[in-house]
Image (spheres, coloured by chain):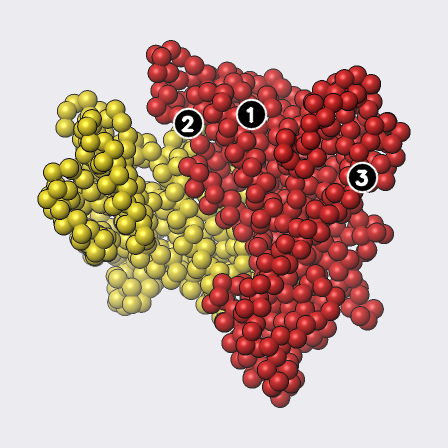
Chain colours: A red, B yellow
Amino acid sequence: MTDAKASQFGVTPQSVDFNEWYNEVVVKADLADYSPVRGSMVVKPYGSAIWERIQRWLDDRFKETGHESLLFPTLIPMNFLQKEAQHVEGFAPELFTVTKIGTEALEEPYVLRPTSETIIGHMWSQWLNSYRDLPFLHYQWGAVFRAELRTKLFLRTAEFYWHEGHTAHATQEEAMAETMQQLDLYHEFCRDVLALPVIRGPKSASERFAGAVETFSIEGMMRDGKALQSGTSHYLGQNFAKAFDVKFQGSDQKEHFVHTTSWAISSRIIGALIMTHGDDKGLQLPPNIAPIQVVVVPVVRKDNAETMYQEADKLAAELRTNGFRVKVDKREGVSNGFKYNDWELKGVPVRIELGPRDLEAGVVVVKNRNADAKETVARMDVVAYMGLRLDEIQQALYDRALSFLQENTVTVDSYEEFKTAIEAGKWVRAFHCGDAESEAQIKEDTKATVRNIPLDGELFGEREEGVCVHTGKPSAYGKRAIFGRQY
Amino acid sequence: MTDAKASQFGVTPQSVDFNEWYNEVVVKADLADYSPVRGSMVVKPYGSAIWERIQRWLDDRFKETGHESLLFPTLIPMNFLQKEAQHVEGFAPELFTVTKIGTEALEEPYVLRPTSETIIGHMWSQWLNSYRDLPFLHYQWGAVFRAELRTKLFLRTAEFYWHEGHTAHATQEEAMAETMQQLDLYHEFCRDVLALPVIRGPKSASERFAGAVETFSIEGMMRDGKALQSGTSHYLGQNFAKAFDVKFQGSDQKEHFVHTTSWAISSRIIGALIMTHGDDKGLQLPPNIAPIQVVVVPVVRKDNAETMYQEADKLAAELRTNGFRVKVDKREGVSNGFKYNDWELKGVPVRIELGPRDLEAGVVVVKNRNADAKETVARMDVVAYMGLRLDEIQQALYDRALSFLQENTVTVDSYEEFKTAIEAGKWVRAFHCGDAESEAQIKEDTKATVRNIPLDGELFGEREEGVCVHTGKPSAYGKRAIFGRQY
């Protein structure tokens, strides 16, 4: 690679400065850009194509499991948030406030929704009559707003994109079953589509969503050892039901408050995708989410361009017929080397170099993004090859990420070991007493927090008794909690 | 129908009060509801399912024609709007203003986007270098905000949903070709999917989008004779390019400003769908857009419920396998009559009544939403029947709407005739001089405006010379303009 190319494609190595690596990859791979609005980003076509695929997969599954989409207003009356005390306390510092419409100053301001439990609760209280109306299984796709001091594209933006699911049930059991079902769906989605190994479990009391009785998360490990909370599912009990008077007449003819849940995955997950699979060449997209799975680069000279473009289109058409997402790179005025680097930076799983002499010999050259060497594949075998190889790449990325997570998680029984491991960028498995004050002190000492307490049967979820690594009190969870620094 | 049922399903007849009919249909058919946020609605699952189908169809077509989706911020710095003089003048009275983040008062306020030309222009100026980068073919789906004094669900809400397309081109010719291509796409979409006959053409100068050089619209006629502007496509010339410094180095090595377009269809179109096809029984959905094309109502007694549900599921499965969207209504505690009225109100194109005796006789009873009588169809022929009948219903709804539009459009040559026809709820074809003052006076006299000037080859688009029906000056357009009252 020449220096000129390096300046265009080269990214700061992860080992030198992981933050800088991330920022460069997002911008240079054309996923997103900074905007003139404080804290907000612009998602560019390549990033948007990834987000659309995420939406499509999840949306289909929501519908299959009986959920219905709605559209609630972006604005929420400020006084709605105040009806749930913990909720407003959690969100007040982050609110965008609308105080004027046209030239009219508003007596009662609106806020841009940071989340929609309140306004949905208000509507439910009007729609709900009888137990026959339940459950409400609702969700919406949209933008939400939470002020951020420092922008980090996808990970920390004032406006971000998500779905938020909201359900109401007659009983605690049903609501809890829904909470777990959606948590499991998120886990499945991360594993099978994004190739992200994530740990399921409840958060500690002090890390719960503002207003929740129980918050469950999925947590992934980034290449710098930090955790990224990649999705959450909350059992809200009757907190919002009582705040918004959401009740129904039961089959017993009496009035009851509903039990509610909410759950979300946001555009932050694209940050997890980047920081779990990326390397010093840039992005690395798992085939199941990649907008482009295979890029075909015809090797063109002046005298053979037309023929080679035809051959490339023919190959692309064959692959598309077999269900692959394919792009042919016909850009002019740039070298093949430029194109190869560009597609590696953009993380396309497989590149096919289509050269005239290879083609005469009945072969094409294939370069997998996750391999160092090129391969030669018979032209007639390309479709069959791709069917196998894309699955292998998907699995290889998952395995790589899982090994990394396992290798960088350590079990400790003393606070000294704890601090050393956190400082070294590890996740730590340790007993904890569950006291909020102790968690706060640990956070102050080490910047680490309880990520979650892995569920039974989950990796790291073994039942075990012991004493708190920080206070020496009995463990609160019957097992070790996961601690780590987080995004 | 008993009185009790009437109160639940009955809607005010269109002939008695069309406005009231509309409001009742939207709420009773469960499309949308009023919200506690001034001017904003909640789109309920049935309305959201329609909107999602609209989105999916259009989105696929945008992508097929090379357009790419992006996500731009919802907030726009107030001073951006001020850079295009006409633009800010047009939108200032309708803006929602954010003046506070957390506890911090903003020196420079943000507005909730009423449309995104300004911020997109700003980003383009950073992204664009060479003619090789062009064209930019961008669009986004999202919510926009324009204050409204009186809410009318779907038609006039402070927050509404849309896509907005934004493209930038090297030449005026390319930009104009794009403008017309998207107008034609909207026309095709309305005709083939929503069964809405619409008239394509340019708006008069005084009805142009704030900042446009030329605005084209598609206009449909509602059952009360009013027009609804159902989509717009704007050629913006270099107005926004100059305001936001969007320029490129041409192949001639010189700098040029781009020529831009923008185009949109919003959730208002659902209002057009309701008011074009609806009748005194409620909604009437064309099969190509209906979330449920066929509803199967098993006729159930206590002793046969299980069998009949099985038979209904079997029939539904057969229909689904053949690509139809089907629902089986297994609600308990309500009568068959209740169900029939409910699905007629919701406008489902075909209802199948599955009774035990009919089934023994090898038949089912079918009721088409747009017919008065029921039909008996052999059970084994249901799939084939549905393939033909749904297409026929789609066509019949289009034909009915087109006849209505033609019958309620009159050609006049005097201002007296003009006023009489408008007062009678007609569209009027008349010559006009194109003067903005004259248009304003006509509007004051009659509440009618120029809807558009139909394109050559379009219905009502015949070339013809004459003198202005209002001023007696020569006609400005070489043909008659369409006047009407509008939503």
Query: In whole angstroms, how far apart are the C-alphas of marks 3 and 1?
Result: 30 Å
User: What residue would you read off at disc 1?
Assistant: A235
Closer to the eye: label 3 or 1: 3
In the foreground, A211 or B18: A211
| Number of other residues with Cα within 10 Å of mark 1, as a class: few under 14, some 14 to 19, many 20 or more | many
User: What residue would you read off at disc 3?
Assistant: A426
Same subunit: marks 2 and 3:
yes
Residue A432 in the image: state x and y as whole percent: 76, 23
| Number of other residues with Cα within 10 Å of mark 3, as a class: few under 14, some 14 to 19, many 20 or more | many
| Residue B182 occupies quadrant | bottom left
- Chain ID at mark 3: A
Mark 2 element type:
loop
Q: In this view, does B121 lie above or below A477?
A: below
Q: Which amino acid does label 2 sit on?
A: Pro
Residue B452 in the image: state x and y as whole percent: 34, 56
Q: What mark, if any, has residue A135 been given in the picture?
A: 2
Residue B250 in the image: state x and y as whole percent: 64, 73
Q: In this view, does A422 lie above or below B285?
A: above
Same subunit: marks 2 and 1:
yes
Looking at marks 2 and 3 on the same chain, the residue that comes earlier in the sequence is marked by: 2
Same subunit: marks 3 and 1:
yes
Mark 3 element type:
loop
Residue A295 in the image: state x and y as whole percent: 61, 68
Q: Is residue A465 visible?
A: yes
- Chain ID at mark 2: A
| Number of other residues with Cα within 10 Å of mark 2, as a class: few under 14, some 14 to 19, many 20 or more | some
- Chain ID at mark 1: A
Q: Which amino acid does label 1 sit on?
A: Tyr
> What residue is shown at x 64% (from left), y 82% (from top)?
A358
> What residue is shown at x 28% (from left), y 41% (from top)?
B313
Q: In this view, which residue lies farthest toward the bottom?
A: A303
Q: Which amino acid does label 3 sit on?
A: Lys
